Amino acid sequence: MAARTTGVVYLLHLDRPFGHAKHYVGFAADLDARLAHHAAGTGANLLRHVRAAGIGWTLARTWERSSRAFERTQHNGGHARRCPICRSTTTKEDTR
């Protein structure tokens, strides 16, 4: 059986920073199952530590029918610009 090359790339917004991290970008063939793993602390290492620190997260954005290659491009920073939660909390004064 061939490996699945498309799925969902997702952006998680952390409720408060964990070190320098404010967001997490991931890829999943089954988004609901992957988010359940993250919530249980059995997903990505960063989110395991975030959970242990008592920090919550919110699914902020998804890119449907995406690839792992696209996910890798999203790791290059600029998460706050792509995060609707961060963009909605930016005031006009913040952009001056």
Image: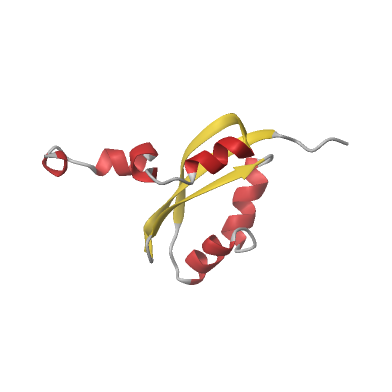
Instruction: Tell me residue 27's x, y (percent).
Output: 61, 43
Spot the residue most to the right.
1
**Total numbered badges shown on the rendered structure:** 0
Query: Residue at horizontal 16%, vertical 39%?
Result: 95
Q: Residue at x 17, y 40 (%)?
A: 91
Which part of the image, by quadrant, shows the N terminus? top right
Q: In which quarter of the image is the C terminus?
A: top left
Which residue is at the far bottom? 52
From what the image shows, is residue 57 above or below residue 45?
above
| Relative side of 32 to 52, left or right | right
Picture layout, residue 73 above or below residue 47:
above
Q: Is residue 72 left or right of residue 80?
A: right
Residue 31 x %, y %: 63, 42
Where residue 28 sits in the image (x, y, percent)?
A: 64, 42
In which image quadrant can residue 90 be found? top left
Residue 93 locus on image (x, y percent): 11, 41
Colour scheme of the picture: secondary structure
Residue for point 56% across, 65% down: 48
Instruction: Please tell me which residue is depicted at 40% across the width and 46% down the height of the picture.
Output: 77
